Image (spheres, coloured by chain):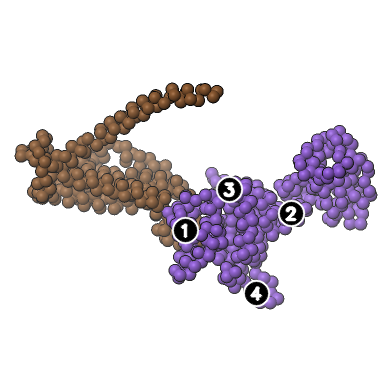
Chain colours: A purple, B brown
């Protein structure tokens, strides 16, 4: 637990004062000049990452995740906006004078140095006494389970081992934040999952802020305290994993994270804080929250596993739509149904496979789909 | 199916052995072709010749090794050659390395022109380069001698260093240097601790090439040397009256040094893992 001391020292605030965030981006824009044309890689990102948080930047390829992270590390200078680390404006500070360390997607290990020299590199630059370097490098190699491989060259090691050297090389400096750019991208699925658990354990152990870039939504959901979903240089939603999953703020987030159904309809009336949508002739969808007026056309999302399939008309308090089963796919733990609605929209439903399951719908059956009002949310278009 | 395996193996085996043997013969022929002249040079350094011309084998002797300084102008010429090589290689290595780094790492205005100029310097005939350098020096009022030879040698070997270094730089992951900066290294430290060790094999290879080009250059040196004698120029003069075995010995020594440095570079590059 000695690892946290340096990082936590300065951040220990006077009681009562709000804690100083580890990382703040304020209206950050990054423009590149490519072939005489201005390309906006990041189009105005504002976010605050708290001390000790596991924060993920999630988004499709080319959405600006790496660029955002490189501005935090100091490799790119924002065209506009400011970057603050622990309250200090570092927008113009070079990377070697920022209190953060980065783990590169390609690992970027020094090929002419062995494992020990790689890990000790940062401490030597900081003129740490050699006795302490030896102790800290030893400790760190123990944490990443590489003790006994100090003399190996990077290219004599497997991908997973190199990844851990890269992690140790950054962590040994006890940075106040660790930036990881798709650090598991080059690993196969099994090793990837093992390393996810490992990373999470290490983060708990050293207790420092992790900023994690990934385009893998399940990785972000399982590991993060909070996630910023990025698209086309902007943050679409910034929230905890559960909220991102259950209450996607935009159609993009709903589509990017897991499977989601998008239903469009017109607001019929507003009843006790619930907008009631008319969907098709008999369908009604209740959307909690949001100020909506009658006559307004909106879209709502609902996750496939929240929907119940039945042949009888469901009770009054639920959202309910009618449709015809067009496809049933057996997926072991659950069945996946594709249900076509009267207006042509297709809804995906996951239904768990209970052993005594009697209510299995067949292809061609006319069915009711129903779900609790709190499981559908109106989203921005 | 099961029978085709052994049968095809039985058929290809002798053919494989036959082509193997052919390949081995070919390799030895190429090696002989490359090294026979060098072997002759080395052997005739030990020739107990009596006449001025050292062309027929007279018996083994070590006496020439003790009389390396028999011809004072030869000693001067060799010393000049070594000095010219050392100075021009030093200048070429520094300039060529910087050029290789710039060409491999950055996009800049004039990059295409630089590449073209480098290629032109490599491919233009020595005779043309020598003659044009001479007229340049004359019209600029520069007296030809040691300095002009160094300038000329830097000129024709610069491209070789730049190209070997550029090849290293291009093959290098740029994020490795960023990692060094990220870990607290200044640009200066990053260069000496990370960039330079990684491009070092290219720098050494380029320097070796420059040394080899400089030490035995004749044509351009002839044009630009003025009164300065170099080893190749001295040999050229001596061939008319007969070449003493000392020339073979000095050639052998230069060859041995070159081989030693090349082997050292290969071995340390492998050990460094780069
Ligand atoms: N140096 C550059 N010059 C010009 N355009 C750039 C440069 N770097 C990035 N871009 C552009 O900026 C956009 C964002 O790039 P960035 O690398 O941040 O994406 P990313 O979200 O990390 O994607 P990936 O998941 O593929 O790594 C892309 O469209 C990219 O083409
Ligand atoms: Mg990226």
SS class, disc 4: loop
Q: CA distance from mark 3 to mark 4?
A: 40 Å
CB at disc 1 and ligand 2 closer than 8 Å: no
Q: Which residue is mark 4?
A: A13
Residue B175 point in image, percent of width and height: 50, 53
Say whether disc 2 or disc 4 marks the residue closer to the N-terminus. 4
Q: Residues within 10 Å of mark 4 (few under 14, many from 20)?
A: few
- Please state the horizontal and vertical placement of residue B207, each as a whole percent of the image: 31, 48
Mark 3 touches mark 1? (CB < 8 Å): no
Q: Are tags 3 and 4 found on a single chain?
A: yes
Q: Nearer the viewer, mark 1 or mark 4?
A: 1
CA distance for labels 1 and 4: 39 Å
* Rendered position, A50 above or below B7: below
Q: Earlier in the sequence, mark 1 or mark 4?
A: 4
Q: Kindly identify which residue carries mark 2.
A: A244
Crowd rating for badge 3 (residues with CA inside 10 Å; few <14, some 14–19, many 20+): some
- Pointer 2: residues within 10 angstroms few (<14), some, or many (20+)? many
| Callouts 1 and 4 close, C-beta under 8 Å | no
Q: Residue furthest left?
A: B50
The answer to whether tags 3 and 1 share a subunit is yes
């Amino acid at each position: 637990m000695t690892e946290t001391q340096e990082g936590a020292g300065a951040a220990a605030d006077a009681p009562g004062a709000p804690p100083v965030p580890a990382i703040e981006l304020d209206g950050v824009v990054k423009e590149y000049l490519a072939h005489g044309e201005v390309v906006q890689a990041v189009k105005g990102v504002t976010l605050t990452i708290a001390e000790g948080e596991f924060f993920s930047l999630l988004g499709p390829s080319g959405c600006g995740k790496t660029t955002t992270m490189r501005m935090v590390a100091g490799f790119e200078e924002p065209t506009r906006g400011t970057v603050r680390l622990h309250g200090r404006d570092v927008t113009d500070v070079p990377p070697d004078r920022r209190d953060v360390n980065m783990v590169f997607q390609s690992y970027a290990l020094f090929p002419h140095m062995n494992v020990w020299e790689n890990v000790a590199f940062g401490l030597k630059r900081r003129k740490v006494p050699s006795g302490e370097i030896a102790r800290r490098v030893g400790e760190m190699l123990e944490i990443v389970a590489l003790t006994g491989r100090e003399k190996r060259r990077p290219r004599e090691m497997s991908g997973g081992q190199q990844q851990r050297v890269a992690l140790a090389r950054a962590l040994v400096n006890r940075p106040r934040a660790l930036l990881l750019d798709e650090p598991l991208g080059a690993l196969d699925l099994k090793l990837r999952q093992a390393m996810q658990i490992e990373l999470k354990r290490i983060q708990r152990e050293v207790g420092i802020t992790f900023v994690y870039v990934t385009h893998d939504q399940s990785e972000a959901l399982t590991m993060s305290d909070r996630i910023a979903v990025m698209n086309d240089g902007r943050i679409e939603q910034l929230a905890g994993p559960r909220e991102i999953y259950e209450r996607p703020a935009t159609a993009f987030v709903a589509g990017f994270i897991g499977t989601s159904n998008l239903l469009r309809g017109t607001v019929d009336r507003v009843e006790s804080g619930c907008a009631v949508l008319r969907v098709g002739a008999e369908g009604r969808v209740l959307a909690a929250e949001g100020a909506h007026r009658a006559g307004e056309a909106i879209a709502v999302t609902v996750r496939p596993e929240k929907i119940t399939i039945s042949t009888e008309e469901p009770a009054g308090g639920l959202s309910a739509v009618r449709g015809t089963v067009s496809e049933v796919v057996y997926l072991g733990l659950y069945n996946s149904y594709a249900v076509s609605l009267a207006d042509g929209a297709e809804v995906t439903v996951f239904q768990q496979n209970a052993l005594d399951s009697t209510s299995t719908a067949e292809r061609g059956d006319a069915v009711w789909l129903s779900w609790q009002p709190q499981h559908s949310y109106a989203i921005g278009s | 199916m099961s029978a085709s395996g052994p049968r095809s193996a039985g058929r290809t085996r002798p053919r494989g052995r036959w082509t193997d043997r052919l390949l081995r013969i070919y390799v030895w022929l190429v090696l002989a072709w490359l090294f026979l002249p060098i072997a002759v040079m080395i052997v005739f350094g030990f020739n107990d010749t009596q006449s001025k011309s050292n062309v027929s084998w007279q018996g083994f002797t070590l006496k020439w090794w003790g009389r390396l300084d028999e011809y004072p102008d030869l000693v001067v010429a060799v010393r000049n050659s070594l000095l010219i090589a050392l100075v021009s290689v030093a200048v070429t290595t520094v300039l060529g390395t910087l050029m290789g780094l710039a060409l491999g790492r950055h996009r800049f205005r004039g990059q295409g022109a630089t590449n073209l100029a480098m290629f032109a310097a490599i491919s233009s005939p020595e005779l043309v380069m020598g003659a044009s350098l001479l007229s340049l020096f004359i019209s600029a009022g520069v007296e030809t001698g040691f300095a002009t030879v160094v300038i000329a040698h830097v000129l024709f070997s610069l491209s070789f260093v730049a190209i070997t270094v550029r090849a290293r730089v291009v093959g290098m992951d740029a994020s490795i240097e960023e990692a060094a900066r990220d870990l607290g290294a200044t640009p200066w430290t990053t260069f000496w601790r990370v960039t330079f060790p990684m491009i070092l094999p290219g720098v050494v290879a380029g320097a070796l090439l420059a040394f080899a080009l400089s030490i035995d250059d004749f044509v351009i040196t002839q044009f630009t040397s003025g009164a300065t004698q170099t080893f190749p120029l001295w040999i050229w003069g001596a061939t008319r009256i007969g070449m003493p075995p000392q020339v073979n010995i000095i050639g052998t020594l230069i060859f041995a040094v070159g081989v030693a440095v090349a082997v050292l570079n290969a071995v340390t590059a492998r050990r460094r893992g780069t």
